[in-house]
């Protein structure tokens, strides 16, 4: 399995292209379509996985949908977030989308798309539509967890207690590499220290 990280010019959010056996998954939709098409190459895109609905992770989603014509995996609340500038923080940005071609998540789930068999975990806190994905040994955490830090919990619909529970969930998982929605990758060992610090910090805020 090959993973390519593309850093967008929208708040330097990360989009990931995952390739295996001639098929590709895309995680988030902040990078320009041309950059994603280049990373995909001759492989067939079979799905788009969204970690949450904030504008810097969904800005080019409709272009991706039109180009690749594949299902989009998202938390149900993510549609509400994408449609609301107040919730997605995109000022005038709003995705005009219908409910077609979406795979809606409400609970932790096992998913198979093409050759990819993976787990989706509900990880709210930064946003109520937060979802993280464990694909083999790679964990895609969106804005829930960063290399050295966690996602903001002072935004519309953010929640400290939900973030604590999400961080505890992630701390109990096994993975090799954590890929964040911004900045660089981190290791399982690095995240054990990082998660411990922020679980304690947020717990003391109560």
Image (tube, grey):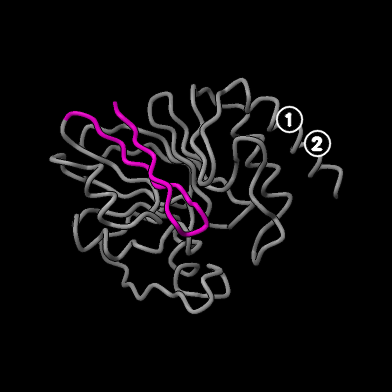
68 vs 75, nearest the viewer: 68
Percent from the top left, x then y, of residue 36?
28, 49
Residue 128 rendering spot, x and y as whole percentages: 58, 57
Q: Would residue 36 appear left or right of 91 to someone viewing this image?
A: left
Q: Which residues are magenta?
A: 1-21
Residue occupying the far left of the picture: 42
> Residue 46 versus residue 193: which sits nearer the camera?
193
The part of the image, by quadrant, that contains residue 148 is top right
Q: 129 or 147: which is nearer to us?
A: 147
| Element under disc 1 | helix
Residue 101: image quadrant is bottom left
Task: Give the residue number, with chain letter if any, for mark 2.
Answer: 200
Main SS category, magenta section: strand
User: Disc 1 marks which residue?
Assistant: 196
- Report the residue at 33% width, 72% height from top: 97
Residue 15 colored magenta? yes
Kindly indicate whether the residue at mark 1 contacts the one at mark 2 (C-beta within 8 angstroms): yes
As measured in the structure, the alpha-carbon distance from the residue carrying label 2 to the one carrying label 1 is 6 Å
Horizontal relation, residue 143 to residue 2: left or right: right
Which of the image's four quarters has the N terminus? top left
Q: Disc 2 on helix, strand or loop?
A: helix
Residue 124 or residue 137, whichever sits in front: 137
x then y, percent, for residue 108: 48, 41
Name the residue at 76% across, 33% down.
197
- Residue 156 lies, in percent from the top left, at 65, 67
Q: Residues within 10 Å of mark 2 (few under 14, many from 20)?
A: few
Query: Is residue 202 located in the magenta-colored stretch of the structure?
Result: no
Query: Who's the residue at 44% across and 39% down the image?
Result: 133
Vertical side of 121 occupied by 99: above or below = below
Residue sticking out furthest to the bottom: 92
């Amino acid at each position: 399995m090959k993973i390519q990280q593309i850093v967008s010019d929208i708040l330097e959010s990360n989009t990931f292209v995952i390739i295996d056996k001639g098929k590709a998954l895309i995680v988030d939709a902040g990078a320009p379509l041309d950059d994603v098409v280049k990373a995909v190459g001759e492989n067939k895109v079979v799905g788009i996985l969204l970690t949450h609905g904030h504008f810097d992770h969904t800005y080019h989603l409709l272009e991706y949908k039109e180009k690749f014509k594949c299902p989009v995996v998202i938390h149900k609340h993510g549609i509400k977030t994408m449609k609301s500038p107040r919730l997605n923080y995109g000022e005038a940005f709003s995705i005009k989308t219908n409910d077609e071609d979406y795979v809606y998540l409400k609970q932790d789930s096992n998913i198979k798309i093409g050759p990819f068999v993976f787990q989706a975990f509900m990880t709210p806190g930064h946003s109520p539509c937060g979802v993280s994905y464990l694909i083999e040994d790679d964990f895609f955490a969106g804005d829930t967890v960063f290399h050295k830090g966690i996602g903001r919990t002072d935004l519309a619909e953010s929640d400290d207690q939900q973030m604590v529970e999400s961080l505890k969930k992630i701390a109990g998982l096994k993975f090799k590499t954590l890929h964040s929605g911004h900045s660089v990758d981190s290791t399982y060992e690095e995240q054990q220290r990082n998660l411990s610090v922020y679980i304690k910090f947020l717990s003391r805020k109560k």
